[in-house]
Amino acid sequence: MTGIAQPSSPLSVGSLTQLTLSLVAIIALILAIGWALKRLKLAGPRGSGQIAVVDELTLSARDRIVLIRVGESQVLLGIGASGLVPLTPLAAPIVLKAGAQTPAFAERLRDMMKRPDGSA
């Protein structure tokens, strides 16, 4: 006997456990990023054609008011747990200031971290 240890099999219990934990961690990371993008409303198209979301105001966890541009006119919609409610078409379009765009990710994250309960 020479005292040389045999190399472990690549299909050993330890390597399979490490592989499984790595895959679970990657899937959890993907789900967490998806949740964060949805929570911060950074995911999804906002529209740039004939129909687009101009601005929105969150009223509660499930309720918000959305200003939609359809062609040259604008429509104010209420979105809530009961569904979509058309509030009113606007006679004169609202022009947003250039600084009224969606804040950068860092600003939104900073705002969320400042809240004592951590809710959005």
Image (tube, rainbow, N blue to C red):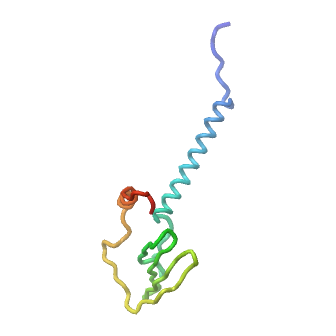
Q: Nearer the viewer, residue 101 or 4?
A: 101
| Residue sitting farthest toward the top | 1
Please identify the quarter of the rendering in which residue 82 is found: bottom right
Image point 47% across, 65% down: which residue?
41
Where's residue 81, x and y in %? 56, 74
| 105 is higher (above) or lower (below) than 53 | above
Where's residue 117, x and y in %? 43, 58
Where's residue 103, x and y in %? 36, 65
The quarter of the rendered structure image containing the C terminus is: bottom left
| 97 is higher (above) or lower (below) than 5 | below
Where's residue 104, x and y in %? 36, 62
Figure label count:
0
Image point 68% across, 29% down: which residue?
12
Image point 39% across, 59% down: which residue?
115
Image point 51% across, 67% down: which residue?
44
Please identify the quarter of the rendering in which residue 8 is found: top right
| Residue sitting farthest toward the bottom | 91
Please identify the quarter of the rendering in which residue 14 is found: top right
The quarter of the rendered structure image containing the N terminus is: top right
